[in-house]
Image (cartoon, coloured by chain):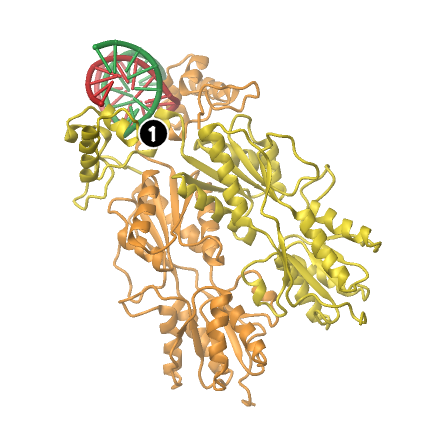
Chain colours: A yellow, B orange, C red, D green
Amino acid sequence: MRVTGNTRGSGAQRSVSIRDVATAAGVSHQTVSRVINGHPSVRASTRERVEAAIAELGFRRSATAHALASGRTRAVTVLTANTTHYGHAAILQGVEEAARAASFAVGISVLDSDDPRVVRDALDRATDAGGGLILIAYDRPGVRALHLAPEGVPLVAAVETPAAPPAAGSPWVWTDDRTAAREATEHLLALGHRTVHYLAIPSTTDSDGGAQRTAGWREALTRAGAVVPEPVEAGWTPAGGYAAGRRLTEDPAVTAVLCGNDDLAIGMLRALREAGREVPGDVSVAGFDDAPHSAFLTPALTTVRLDFTGVGRACFALLHGLVEQGDPISPHPVATPRLIVRESTGPAPGSR
Amino acid sequence: MRVTGNTRGSGAQRSVSIRDVATAAGVSHQTVSRVINGHPSVRASTRERVEAAIAELGFRRSATAHALASGRTRAVTVLTANTTHYGHAAILQGVEEAARAASFAVGISVLDSDDPRVVRDALDRATDAGGGLILIAYDRPGVRALHLAPEGVPLVAAVETPAAPPAAGSPWVWTDDRTAAREATEHLLALGHRTVHYLAIPSTTDSDGGAQRTAGWREALTRAGAVVPEPVEAGWTPAGGYAAGRRLTEDPAVTAVLCGNDDLAIGMLRALREAGREVPGDVSVAGFDDAPHSAFLTPALTTVRLDFTGVGRACFALLHGLVEQGDPISPHPVATPRLIVRESTGPAPGSR
DNA sequence: CTGAAAGCGCTTACAG
DNA sequence: CTGAAAGCGCTTACAG
């Protein structure tokens, strides 16, 4: 869109440049540049005159010209497979919040599939804009983007809990899902359940030790000497949880189900209800996320609260440090997840 | 961030310019510009050479330089009060989808409050980037932004259903909430309920006839000769619906409640449950939105499906037409909402 | 402390 | 059909 040359009477139009300000203040455009960049070596009186002219003319620096001339784009773009899932949306919110505080613009680009061409194209477009990249690598498209991202582009990723401590310099942020899954499972075990079944979100870690949410669950089971059932992958949505849940409800031995996210738990709850099984009387259900509505479900959902907004903020902070001060990257987990016990989990049937 | 001058061995670095391509192809950078812009007057053989050079060097046009030189930024930024509410997130998804298809970048800026300074600041920052604006004006911050937006900046807004047909040239997109609310209310009335109570989301229309969702509800009631209870404003969240719901449940005359969105309905459902009232046996509840989990609640929620993604796509299409072809703006509603009857609504108690 | 010059990577007229 | 020149609105050294 044309942003130059059409100053309407209304005024809010961009068109006043650094040169206009310079003329009005009786200095060179150079000096105006120094003032807007907070350069120290400007006489106080000069600075004041320039600032007055800026205020009067309503000058705003062109982000475009600044980016081109300086080689630094004050922007990040987040690549994500989805904007409507609670976790993804909350991360975006966190990024935006932190970016705004630092006067960075935030772009968004959604990854439609994990087709390499699609992902590469998204990466290219995000890179074209200049600025850094934040990847939400919780799913296949995101992980693919992480693998395909070009060298040299500043980048931070929100990832699943890594199996092993990542190499220093890996620009990763995560929550400690393994511990969280273990605790949730232990909670269920302590309630007298013989074992805990697991409805998994799709795993993204093909090779290196598997998903840590799954690992934490398995660990708790193993420690307790419980049978470890086959985890069932259910996707991300309530519909997925429902479909997988219907199969699980056919097995009377199932008395406790841990779900990879709250949406899955909602589907599971529904499947249980249709099968005539009481929650938590017959079956206990726990989720992951603590989405805003989870506390208001009936039964209110026991779930692991994950600080997605914090993950978003941390991603931005890391990236910002990287591009502004050239900070060394240290991969790090963000705030520990916390188990919120509500109504959907209870004593195993016949355990008392 | 620095995007120039550091071509790592890995290659994916930006640094090859139009001039590099020109040299490689043995033409002027001018001609390269023509080729990448699809200008017709380039000899086929020349074009091929240039295209080969582009492919070989991995050239990508700098969006920044293009924007500065041409005065057109191929980008839109969406201003919204929230990214986690389903409706807002789905609109964003729709915008992104359409923008991607048109090779536009999409930025996002969240409006923290309706404080004019905050809103003006967000508007300024969004404008600095160049490109057009899409406002989600479903709430006070968004409506404030609509009022405060500078003239001359290309802009489209997703708005509540206007009370009167807007002036030609108003860059607005909406769903027909009035009809939708009327139909949902009629559905409840047809079930034998004496009247329908209304849990409202905050209205943004101060002056011009009030919220159309409310108006549609009122209209249905009036036509049926039913008592019109005072609508109760409940915010946007499940917590808000719950709080307002608790008050409503104290009134035994309440047998049907229409909620301004599904989150409110979830809170209402919870309040009813705690009060020991059956749904739909004692009280019927209907929502607005048809969020993905609404079909899986117990009871599954009767609700009005709103095509938020379609709204997002329409917003972009309008804006795109405006900035690219200078299309005249025609304000228009998007796909008609549809009532989805599920389990949470049923015959009035004692009506049969 | 401040200004004149050159340049960021493109596009836009203007010539030919 | 193609090239040389000027310019978009800034910043970055370089002088003084």
Indicate the quadrant containing the N terminus of chain A: top left, top right, bottom left or bottom right.
Answer: top left
**Residue B114 in view, yes or no:** yes
Residue at 73%, 70% (x, y): give it: A275
Badge 1: how crowded within 10 Å, few (<14), some, or many (20+)? some
Residue at 24%, 28% (x, y): give it: A32
Q: Who is closer to the viewer here, B174 or B130?
A: B130
- Percent coordinates x, y for residue A57 in the rendering: 19, 38
Q: Is residue B277 left or right of A218 when viewed as pictured? A: left
Would you place residue A63 above or below residue B232 in this image? above
Q: Is residue B352 left or right of B194 when viewed as pictured? A: right
Q: Element at badge 1?
A: helix
Q: Which residue is mark 1?
A: A66
Residue at 46%, 21% (x, y): give it: B15
- Percent coordinates x, y for residue B12 in the rendering: 53, 24
Q: How many marks?
A: 1
Would you place residue B73 above or below residue B311 in this image? above
- Percent coordinates x, y for residue B237 in the rendering: 48, 64
Would you place residue B335 above or below residue A277 in this image? above
- Percent coordinates x, y for residue B263 in the rendering: 50, 65
Q: Quadrant of residue A118?
A: top right
Q: Chain of mark 1?
A: A
Indicate the quadrant containing the C terminus of chain A: top left, top right, bottom left or bottom right.
Answer: bottom right
